[in-house]
Image (cartoon, rainbow, N blue to C red):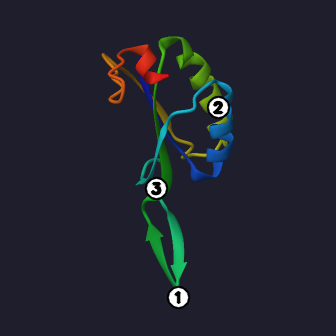
Amino acid sequence: MKKIETIIRPSVFGDVRQALALEGIDGLSVTEIAGIGKQEGRIGMFRGNTYKMEFSPKLKLEMVVEDSKVEAIIEALLDYAATGEVGDGKIFIFAVEEAIRIRTKERGDVAVG
């Protein structure tokens, strides 16, 4: 099993969610985050005053999947999260030793699906 964490722009979430659903991913966690990277923020305006907004709003998606689904998910993320602009995000893949469904005590791949 693998845990896939990806950081994306909020504006692409709808398309990414649909693409993941087509790959059979119906369980994921979404967290609203803010980050700074090569985008280096942007200039905002409030009540006539300009200020630098150093952190850009992002979404972090987390899912644990069977090894056989990883490449298809990566391709879906690359296809639907990309805008071609700096700040499109990142994908991180981690090995998962064990998964346990609390309600049924099931372990392994069956606990993920």
- Hey, which quadrant is residue 107 in on the image? top left
The residue at which mark 1 appears reads as 47
- The amino acid on which the numbered mark 2 sits, given as a three-letter code, is Ala
* x and y percentages locating residue 64 in the rendered image: 44, 26
Indicate the secondary structure of the residue bearing disc 3.
Answer: loop
- In this rendering, the answer to whether 13 lies above or below 34 is above
Q: CA distance from mark 3 to mark 2?
A: 32 Å
Q: Classify the position of the N terminus by image quarter.
A: top left
Cβ atoms at labels 3 and 2 below 8 Å apart: no
- The amino acid on which the numbered mark 3 sits, given as a three-letter code, is Glu
Q: Nearer the viewer, residue 32 or 50?
A: 32
- Quick check: 25 left or right of 3? right
Indicate the secondary structure of the residue bearing disc 2.
Answer: helix
- In this rendering, the answer to whether 40 lies above or below 42 is above
- In this rendering, the answer to whether 47 lies above or below 93 is below
Q: Residue at x 44, y 23 (%)?
A: 112
- Quick check: 94 left or right of 60? left
Task: Mark 1 or mark 2: name the one nearer the start of the chain.
Answer: 2
- Quick check: 84 left or right of 107? right
- The amino acid on which the numbered mark 1 sits, given as a three-letter code, is Arg
Q: Residue furthest top?
A: 68
Residue 21: give its label.
2
* x and y percentages locating residue 55 in the rendered image: 43, 59
Question: Circle 2: is it few (<14), some (14-19), or many (20+) Cα within 10 Å?
Answer: few
Residue 40: give its label.
3
Residue 104: give its label.
none
Q: Nearer the viewer, mark 3 or mark 1?
A: 1
Cβ atoms at labels 1 and 2 below 8 Å apart: no
Q: CA distance from mark 3 to mark 1?
A: 23 Å
